[in-house]
Image (tube, rainbow, N blue to C red):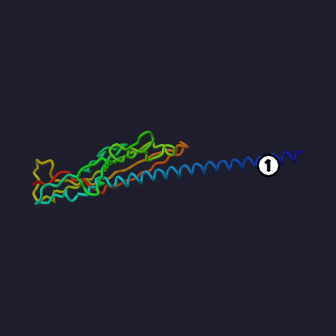
């Protein structure tokens, strides 16, 4: 009888140990699945954001903005505006040309942006058309931050006539613009699962401020 009870106790101990190990493995597998899904969602959102930001300021008529010594001042790029321009923000707005034939104006379907609202990153497609980029049922975004960095290059050597010292608009300066994007999110299924992703994008379309003297 004693041997039977000892054997039964050992059997129950082995079964309990096995169940504990199996439950631990299931928890780890679930956590790994949630982490993988969260990172996949963050990478997808980051790729879309950086891809679109890279196009900010694109203008099919950019050659018309070039000012030659024998020509009148060029036309200003209608898609050059970008916000934020200095401080970090949880929203970014920009524009780029989608015209098959450039009409030299900013149309309603050429305005874009991203913003954080209610734990969701929203994407702007057109002047007033916002739609969710991330799914709140999968990932709850706690931080979306866009930080601009601007490097200015002095273009005084390219002016045929020296600048007047009193002219604040001269010399022209080329702005080399970059944006850092930071996203932090936690899994909607398990708040303990939290991940962050940082990316940066160099805008292809530099902005020119100022002009050479006539």
Instruction: Decide which of 72, 158 is in the foreground and name it.
Output: 72
Q: Secondary structure at mark 1?
A: helix
Relative image position of residue 176 (x, y in whole percent): 27, 55
Relative image position of residue 122 (x, y in whole percent): 41, 44
Q: In which quadrant will I find the N terminus?
A: top right
Judged left or right of residue 168, residue 44 is right
Q: Against 206, is 194 above or below?
A: above
Judged left or right of residue 24, residue 119 is left
Farthest front residue in view? 101
Labels in figure, total: 1
Relative image position of residue 163 (x, y in whole percent): 11, 53
Farthest right residue in view? 1
The residue depicted at 35 percent of the width and 54 percent of the height is 201
Relative image position of residue 134 (x, y in whole percent): 45, 47
The crowding category of the residue bearing disc 1, from other C-alpha atoms within 10 Å (few below 14, some 14 to 19, many at least 20), is few
The residue depicted at 35 percent of the width and 47 percent of the height is 113
Q: Which residue is mark 1?
A: 11
Judged left or right of residue 39, residue 55 is left
Q: In which quadrant will I find the C terminus?
A: bottom left
């Amino acid at each position: 009888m004693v041997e039977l009870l000892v054997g039964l106790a050992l059997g129950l101990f082995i079964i309990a140990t096995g169940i504990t190990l199996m439950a631990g493995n299931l928890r780890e597998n679930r956590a790994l699945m949630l982490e993988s899904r969260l990172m996949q969602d963050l990478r997808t959102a980051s790729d879309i954001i950086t891809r679109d930001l890279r196009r900010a300021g694109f203008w099919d008529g950019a050659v018309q903005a070039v000012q030659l010594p024998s020509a009148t001042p060029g036309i200003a790029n209608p898609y050059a505006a970008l916000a934020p321009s200095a401080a970090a923000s949880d929203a970014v707005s920009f524009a780029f040309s989608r015209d098959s034939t450039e009409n030299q104006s900013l149309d309603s379907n050429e305005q874009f942006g991203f913003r954080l609202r209610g734990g969701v990153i929203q994407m702007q497609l057109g002047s007033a058309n916002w739609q969710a980029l991330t799914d709140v049922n999968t990932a709850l975004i706690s931080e979306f931050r866009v930080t601009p960095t601007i490097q200015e290059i002095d273009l005084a050597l390219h002016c045929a006539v020296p600048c007047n010292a009193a002219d604040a608009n001269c010399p022209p300066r080329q702005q080399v613009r970059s944006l850092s994007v930071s996203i932090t999110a936690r899994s909607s299924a398990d708040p303990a699962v939290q991940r962050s992703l940082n990316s940066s994008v160099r805008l292809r379309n530099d902005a020119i401020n100022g002009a050479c003297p006539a």
